[in-house]
Structure formats: structure tokens, C-alpha cells
Image (cartoon, grey):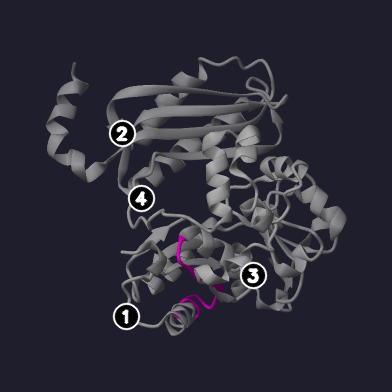
Amino acid sequence: MNMKNRRIAHLDMDAFYASVELLRYPELRGLPVVIGGRSVHQPIMQQNGTCLYAKLCEYSGRGVVTTSTYEARAYGIFSAMGIMQAAKLAPNAILLPADFDAYRHYSQLFKNAVANITPHIEDRGIDEIYIDLSKHPDETTPLALRIKQAVYETTGLSCSAGVAPNKLLAKICSDLEKPNGLTILTHADIPHRIWPLPVHKINGIGPKTQAKLANLGIHKIGELANTEPGLLQLHFGQRYALQLHQAALGNDDRMVVTSSEPKSISRETTFERDLHAHQDREKLSAIFTGLCTHIAEDLHHKGYVGRTIGIKLRYENFQTVTRDQTLCTPTADVVTIRKAAGNCLRRVPLEQKLRLLGVRASNLSRADELMEESHLFQEELFL
């Protein structure tokens, strides 16, 4: 297929976590709401039938914002911001704890709704997907509107979509008319629709690259597109310079990948206060076991087993260390995972206080594909 004839859609749910919470608490619509509190911030049902909500000004700790409503974003509150910092911007904003079970439920609902219309979907996370519409017989606009309507009817939630000749442009477009937007772009539209945008709109250009480009006088995507490749190579190296220039021109030949194998499955948590391995041994042990349990559950749910178990520690001085152990037999058993992770833990110094703890399973295999070889695994167990 001619790459210019492709129709790739990027569908992004609008303020997904917050929107799911508003389904549960519709009285909060139109208010600044921040998701990211702890279980103690769960709304309290009062005798008169109304809920008593926690506010940002009541929060104390080192948690970060998971997401926020558009009303909270108007105050400058965005994901990954410290909740204490957010409280300075909007002290009376509502604070709700995250409910990832609910988010995963609605994620599956919206993806199933899209799959009923077109199956060529690349899952990019809990709240976004790419869709290859190239071979679908319907015209682009009515098809995109049909998909958006199906998502709304299934979930009660809105989404924004961008349709373009490739994934790079589709992702940019899905963000242009949020919330509940639809942007359709062709190659001919790039000079007047894409080039006036700031360079950070290109997925993958982060603050450091943006700052380096700004030092070169490059602020807009169009300016990047019209920059001599040789100049970019001096500052970014040949390979990355080529990627930057091609992205600015709107070129991207990546395909929509409808199936992929995860490289690893991990769980980690940042503590509200730094914990000491000896003084807080009981609490750390419970957290550690909980992380291992979640890893085992995730492996079972996704149908994988892992052969390498690892840990991640971040000390109070922000130094991060990792250790791992490769097993003779792939596993999804929580006891085996806990034992291997514990062996890894014994190989790191624990004099400093800890601010983060994580567990990871990697070197994954499909559990069903290994069933036929289970007798080999049994033999290894008794070596």
C-alpha cells in the first residue's frame, strides 16, 4: 500500500481517570478535581445522602497527581506534579484516590467498542490506541464519528481522535481539539496545520531536546522542517537528527502493530515517607510481598510466565539500584517470585532509607506455549 494512502487514527480518551470518577460522582462535573490521593481520601457518604470530599489543602505527603479534570488544568495542575505543589495552585480543588480496577474496566470497554467496528488496533496503554482504517470501506469522517459515538454509548465517556496518513501525525491531531475533538489531516495540510505548532507537539521531543532546539532558534515544527540536516547532526548526532527532521516533515513509516509481546511486567511504589530497612522492616515486608503478589496476578491475567525476577530500589538521596535473578524455570507463582526478589534484595546495601521499591518480571514467555514442554520443567525441578 502507498504510504500516503494510509488512514491511521489515534484515539485518546479525554482526562480518562478523572472522567471515570465523574461517572461515579456526577455532582463534581465542572469543578477542579485531582486524582491521586490515598484511600483515606475516599469520599464519605453523609446521612443526608451527599458526599463529603477531601480537598487538596488537606493533603500532606509526597504523592503525585495521576490526572486532573480540565477545570483543574486551568489552574496549571497536570499529571506527575506533586500534590503538595498542586495544593498551592488550587487549595480547594477536590482530591480523589485512584481506582485502577475501574479504569482498567472502562479501558477494556472502549477498546471492545472500537474493535466491533474495526479490528486493526494497536494498544498503546490504558487510555489510547492507534487504529488502521486504510482498508475500511467507509469514508473517513463518518467512520471516525461512528467510532467516537460507539465509545460514548458504551462507556459514557468522550474521546478525541486524529486521523492522518501516519501514526506521528495522527497522535498530534488527536490533541488539537480536546476534549471530544476530531481532526482529520492530509499531507497537504502539514504546512498550515502542523508547522505552526511548537516542537514539543512531536511525540518524543521532551524538555531537554526542546531546550537544545530553542538554543538553535528552533521553536516551531516548521522551523525544524526547514533547518539544514547538517546543523542538526552537529548537535544531535546523525541518527537522531534524521529522526527529528523526518518527523518535522510529517514522515513516519511505522505500521500499526495489532499484537505485541511485553518485554517485562513491573510494579513499584513510592513511599509517603522514607522507610528504613530495619526500623520499618514490618511495613516494608508487607509492601514487598504485596508487589510480588501483584506481579503474580498480572502474569496470570496476561497469560505469561517470567524467568527473570528483579528489584528496583531508590534511596533517600535519589540513587537508584537494580538487581535480578534468572530462574531455571519460568514462573508466575507468587511464592517463587517473592523468594527470588528476596534473594535480589539481599544483594543491595540497606543502610540508607528508601523512597521507592519495585519488583519486575522479565524474560517472559507465553504460559500456554510452554504447556507442551511442562515435562521438561518438571525434570529441572528435581535436578
Q: Secondary structure at mark 4?
A: helix
* Closer to the eye: label 1 or 3: 3
From mark 2 to mark 3, how far is it between C-alphas? 53 Å
Q: How many marks?
A: 4
Q: Tell me the kind of residue under disc 3.
A: His
Instruction: Indicate which disc, 1 or 2, sits on the residue closer to the N terminus.
Output: 1
Above or below, 345 against 271 in this view is above
Q: Which residue is mark 3?
A: 192
From mark 1 to mark 3, how far is it between C-alphas? 29 Å
Evaluate if marks 1 and 3 touch, with contact meaning CB atoms under 8 Å apart. no
From mark 1 to mark 2, how far is it between C-alphas? 45 Å
From mark 4 to mark 3, how far is it between C-alphas? 46 Å
Q: Which residue is mark 4?
A: 301
Towards the viewer: 191 or 86: 191
Q: Which residue is mark 2?
A: 331
Instruction: Indicate which disc, 4 or 1, sits on the residue closer to the N terminus.
Output: 1
Kindly identify which numbered label has been placed on residue 137.
1
From mark 2 to mark 4, how far is it between C-alphas? 13 Å
